[in-house]
Amino acid sequence: MEKIWLKSYPPGVPAEIDPGRYASITALLEESFSAYRTKPAFACMGKSITYGELDDLSRRLAAWFQSRGIARGARIAIMMPNVLQYPVALAAILRAGYVVVNVNPLYTPRELEHQLKDSGAEAIVILENFAATLDAVIANTGMKHVVVASMGDLLGVKGCIVNFVVRRVKKMVPAWTLPGHVRFSDALSAGARASFKPVEQKPEDIAFLQYTGGTTGVSKGATLLHRNLIANVLQSAAWSEPALSKLPAGMQPVTVAALPLYHVFALTVCGLLTIRTGGLAILIPNPRDIAGMIKELEGYAITTFPAVNTLYNAILNHPDFGKLDFSKLLVANGGGMAVQEAVANRWFEKTQTPVVEGYGLSETSPCVTCNPTTATEYTGTIGLPLPSTEISIRDDGGNELPVGEPGEICIRGPQVMAGYWQRPEETAKVMTADGYFKSGDVGVMNTRGYIKLVDRKKDMILVSGFNVYPNEVEDVVAKLPGVFEVAAVGVPDPHSGEAVKLFIVKRDPALTDKDVFEFCKTQLTGYKRPKIIEFRTDLPKTNVGKILRRELRDGRA
């Protein structure tokens, strides 16, 4: 396909990036450690660490790993929320030549066991709050080294108080044993006495095994190379440049890291991109605690706010929203799920900065497309392909479709994974002969190169032979003032094969199903209208805040 999207690029954004600029993520990290040594890099719970401290602490932990005799290329898991120990562990693992395996700390023992066994991880850095989960399955895994961190590590004098509150007052640490484990602070002390041996790394070396949510069956590790992540950081940096260039001279960019860093969107945009630009990331350990998050962010002039629709919605609805300083806000990235127009409009109204929606996947490190950061209004699209990225819209036979026709979004670019970890058959299913990754998402490109995400193939509802896309129905219903959250799924119907069912969380207790039916009658054609409405107090979500339609559809939530 001709790259029709390039004519819509904002001035100053290049068509291509140079992924060979750094040999490895380690080279990128060390450049920033040197250039921004005295600047704060990450802050959490009122304490910050500088780039120089991140350099020193990660070097010590890397030396400790090496002193254990762990071979280069070994997989090391991180099982932590957004706390200061996370970037330290991340940098240490990469610098020592190992592979990061990001683990969701809220995994059940079953899910954790699968990921540790599948990845072959032999070491883990884990927050003690989740150690009981590891305790339940460690005997079934090949785990040899366990480093246990506590919330108070790296928080200085207040660390003891934080640990006391977390363990004794809030009782957030279930009992665990993990014989032979080493405390995070002890590993740092021992590492300071050992010598760190720098490792020469190549762009083709594996950096991460990023496990996908398992929406297509068993959870699989996307094998992301150093060059994949470097490419995506450089693509994201080039895309953000028109906005970030407006930053007053000498002012440090401040990013809200409320999305969990173990998720690939936050890892790249809040973690690696922040480090590359010498920014400060404010780590939010529990983004579900909106009041706590707002308190944490008070006093900072926020410049970048990456979030998902549910987080934007929740923070906008909090009475303390007005306490935050968005006067320097330059970029609000929306990803992970469709941003609803009603939410995007309210965000713009309050901050005068549009939500620029983007799109990506674990398999693409993750960013693929994004709306220009110069946008002034909500477009309802996922934007344009990023520099060095090619998008081809194809039919089920793999043929490219003309502009304006919906088909599967297929992606080619330097950010596309090397394949699924030790699953060549699964890799073969998603890669085309000409090197495109088949996303499993349905999209349509317009004449200006903007792509509208129509839906996941499997979320599509088939009503009497007509395709109904849940995103469209949800977007409409979300505009009804009494609706707080909504999910649309297909349920079996004797007459039409499938019918649309809505699950709604009310904003207004007086809202009735009749109100919703009447509203939909004015907004949606017959076959798209919901037949059944179920009111709920909440909807099942992933840790990133993405609504789990599958669980609603299967009756598991």
Image: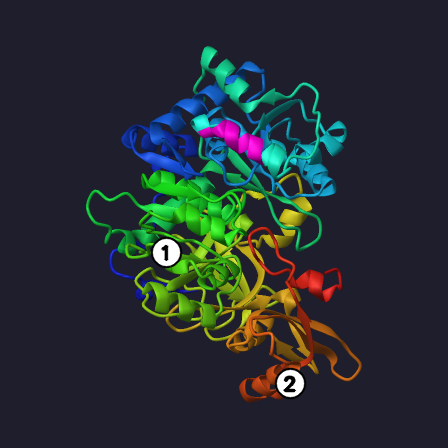
| Residue range highlighted in magenta | 158-165
Identified at 40% across, 63% down, the residue is: 355
47, above or below 97, in the image: below
Q: Look at the numbered disc 2 and give the secondary structure of its residue.
A: helix
Residue 380 placed where, x, y %?
Answer: 44, 71
Q: Look at the numbered disc 1 and give the secondary structure of its residue.
A: helix
Residue 210 magenta: no
Identified at 70% across, 36% down, the residue is: 133
Gap in angstroms between the C-alphas marked 2 and 1: 37 Å
* Left or right, 538 with reference to 350: right
* Left or right, 54 with reference to 442: left
Residue situated furthest right in the rendering: 494
Residue 161 magenta: yes
31, above or below 395, in the image: above
Q: Evaluate whether residue 269 shows in this view.
A: no
Identified at 38% across, 26% down, the residue is: 53
Residue linked to disc 1:
323
Query: Between residues 408 and 164, which one lies in front from this camera angle?
Result: 164
Residue 458 placed where, x, y %?
Answer: 66, 65
Residue 272 placed where, x, y %?
Answer: 41, 40
